[in-house]
Amino acid sequence: MSQQDKLWGGRFAEATDQFVETFTASVSFDRRLYRHDIRGSQAHARMLVEVGVLSAEDGRLIQEGLEAILADIEAGRFEWRVDLEDVHMNIEARLTARIGDAGKRLHTGRSRNDQVATATRLYLRDAVDDLGRELRRLMQGLVDLAEREHATIMPGFTHLQTAQPITFGHHLLAWFEMLWRDHERLRDTRHRLNRLPLGAAALAGTSYPIDRELTARLLGFEGICENSLDAVSDRDFAIEFCAAASLIMMHLSRFSEELVLWASMQFRFIDLPDRFCTGSSIMPQKKNPDVPELVRGKTGRVYGHLMALLTLMKAQPLAYNKDNQEDKEPLFDTVDTVGGSLRAFADMVVHLQPQRERMRQAALDGYATATDLADYLVRKGTPFRDAHEIVGQAVRAGIEQGVDLSQMPLAQLQSFSAQIEDDVFAVLSLEGSVAQRAHRGGTAPQQVLRAVAQARQRLLSLND
Ligand code: ARG
């Protein structure tokens, strides 16, 4: 196309280099913003009519023209042109082709710099809301499972060595807490991104008598960006979002790692539903935990996007620079990756099948109640350090004979300490051990049920 067809062609004597045109264009990826770009334009046009910069008739033509373009795009009837560079100029050019001069007046009092910042914020606000819903679905699944498994006993680990018995419900609620913080972080990010850049125009504001508060209200923004230079150049919101997304992925990767371990033949703590796994083309016995593995792997790519955006913004002088066009792909891919990962987990978690007998046996095998025996001796008057030593000797004897502490005859236990009496078996049992940790935040089944009820309340509070 000739330079005269470009929306900014007036100043140019020579056509854009073909390769440069493609190289600098963003429409291949930023067309994803079309709905938000149109919404932003409609609000801008309405405001311009309200303040008397546009006639009511031009305003009407613009609204209708944009609606028609929206319908065309959604129906796949819109022809995206690389020579028009980005989503914004594609839509504006199409509008002018449809409605004539009124279309050319839409860009009054704004610039693509505040336009793109507005569309990106609107897009991300919707994405954050969608992700929040998926997070809630996953949390809900965990809480339901925790309630069912509130009394299921498993070994708790430190250093991946059996440490103390815990309840599976308690373990599930640890994941709930991580995701709850993620949800809080998303809400916090949403609050800060929910401000209107429009009105900043290219960088310095505009000479038209615009009403930014009105545009902000029309778009559901909580306020306006206070400084025009900052409004067009700020991408903190994208970075914050990718940071929150990185934490979500970090949590999902830990969750994934445990599922991969637990589904292995060595642990056999859980069965993953077949439809979340795949087989091997050579080893017929295999059932691979693909979904958790893939989510664990995708975590790295989201961290990468965070780093890309931080580096993109590093040392950029005010105000808008073309560099900022590079914010889109990392941002979009982060939204897609986190969205897909959360969705797969929310779908999968409700189908986890705990192997209760295996879990229980693993807790028994690992001398998980050794601390309980030490605490028992302390209650009988033995100083803790001595109790620790005594129990260590008992465990060594147990390992040599291949028996658990709870399986030793009383007389043998008494050979380690005369303070041991037959009430010791109550604390050496797995059930006795978990039941004693009955304070808030502890692993006792009763506490798990209390925590489940509280988690349900917290989830309900999000439904407004
Ligand atoms: N495609 C650009 C972006 O994504 C839109 C803004 C361009 N502004 C400019 N003056 N070149 O950032």
Image (tube, helix red, strand yellow):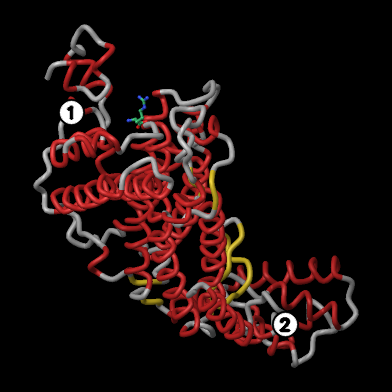
Q: Quadrant of residue 327?
A: top left
- Please name whichever residue, 76 or 424, is drawn nearer the observer in this view of the structure: 76
Q: List the single residue furthest toward the bottom.
A: 422
Instruction: Categorize mark 1 by other alpha carbons within 10 Å: few (<14), some (14-19), many (20+).
Output: some
Q: Quadrant of ligand 1?
A: top left
Q: List the single residue furthest toward the top.
A: 13
Q: Residue at x 49, y 27 (%)?
A: 203
Tag 2 residue? 412
* Nearest to N terminus: mark 2 or mark 1: 1
Q: List the single residue furthest toward the left.
A: 77
**Does residue 13 appear in this view?**
yes
As drawn, the label of residue 82 is 1
- Please name whichever residue, 323 or 105, is drawn nearer the observer in this view of the structure: 105
- Please name whichever residue, 48 or 185, is drawn nearer the observer in this view of the structure: 48
User: Measured from the top left, where is residue 238 in percent x and y?
Assistant: 47, 42
**Does residue 297 appear in this view?**
no
User: Measured from the top left, where is residue 342 in percent x and y?
Assistant: 38, 60
Q: Residue at x 20, y 59 (%)?
A: 279
The amino acid type found where label 2 is placed reads Gln
The amino acid type found where label 1 is placed reads Val
Mark 2 beta carbon near ligand 1 (under 8 Å): no
Decide: is 127 above or below 151: above
User: Measured from the top left, where is residue 176 in percent x and y?
Assistant: 52, 68
User: Measured from the top left, where is residue 58 in percent x and y?
Assistant: 26, 44
Given contact means CB atoms under 8 Å apart, are the residues at marks 2 and 1 in contact? no
